[in-house]
Image: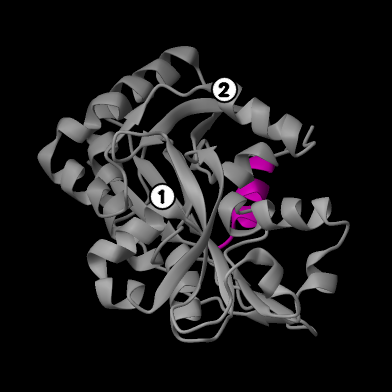
Amino acid sequence: MTLIFVSMLCGGCDKSEGKIDFSELQENSTINSIPEKTPLRIAFASVISPIDTRKSYHVLIDELSRQLDQPVVLIQKKTYEELNVLLANGEADIAFLSTGAYISYKGAYPIELLAMIKTNDTIFYDTYLITAKDSDIESFDDLYHKTIAFTDPASFSGKLVIDNILSSKNTTVEEYFYRYFYTYNHDKSILAVANHLADAASVDSQVYDYTLKKNPDIIKQIKIIDVLEKAPSGPIVIRKDIDKEMKAKIQNILFNIHTVKNVKEALNKVMIDQFVVPNPELYENLKQKYKIK
């Protein structure tokens, strides 16, 4: 089965007072040649290591391509904003979105839910507010005029939750913190705190658990000072104008693809146990709460 992998990452963002760019570029790579059939374009932005995510998604997409009997193009973006722009311009058919990216999507091309991610028997995750183990910071109020690491401007656990807290305090990120920067991966936010590059960070609880298993020595260097808002897992979405029969076929494959041994092993490496039927109401509730229309 023909498969193409395209890695598309932007360069470093401009630095300004109060901001540090903590991003990393990845090299472009292409597998095989351009397929004869029109490929299905699937896009993602990684919440953990881009390299680990790419390897696992490569296995997933290869199996999806085989079962569909159709070529697939995998498009990797660095930020959630870039992913939303890709969808908005009609340049992707399917995308793995974060919770925040989905509830804030306002593109001209309508999208709909295709599947949700289930991990450790749940479709939800918490937001952990973390700081260094040897820090004297014990609460959110102690973060005043400190440095915080954010995951991405559109990350629910890595930014939007903090924005909501600050809004309730009638203040902003710029006013409340001494400095902030974006890491573009939850595991890098954890590393930033462990290495004292930031006083604190808010991260996805599932990534915290993932890091605990993969690098327990890093977790030993941090502590959780608060458990913030719970949210539904980031969904897989599809363009609304995709043929209904094709959509149903893709869903059926995704809902059962975890039974394929090598795919299951690959998905587990990026905190995915299986794909399940999505619940639109969960995301609508967040949109209303965060006044996103």
Q: Is residue 215 magenta?
A: no
Q: Secondary structure at mark 1?
A: strand
Percent coordinates x, y for residue 204 in the rendering:
47, 54
Q: Is residue 79 magenta?
A: yes
Q: Which residues are magenta?
A: 78-89
Which residue is at a point 80% across and 85% down the rendered structure image?
17
The amino acid type, in three-letter code, at marker 2 is Pro
Q: Which residue is mark 2?
A: 280
Residue 241 visible = no
Q: Residues within 10 Å of mark 2 (few under 14, many from 20)?
A: few
Between the residue at mark 1 and the residue at mark 2, the CA separation in whole angstroms equals: 25 Å
N-terminal-most mark, 1 or 2: 1
Tell me which secondary structure the magenta stretch mostly adopts: helix
Task: Indicate whether 111 appears above or below 178.
Answer: above
> Could you tell me residue 180's position as x and y percent?
69, 76
Residue 194 rendering spot, x and y as whole percentages: 44, 80
Element under label 2? helix
Q: Quadrant of residue 20?
A: bottom right
Q: Quadrant of residue 291?
A: top right
- Which residue lies at the image location 66% right of the left edge and 26% below the top edge? 284
Residue underneath mark 1: 74
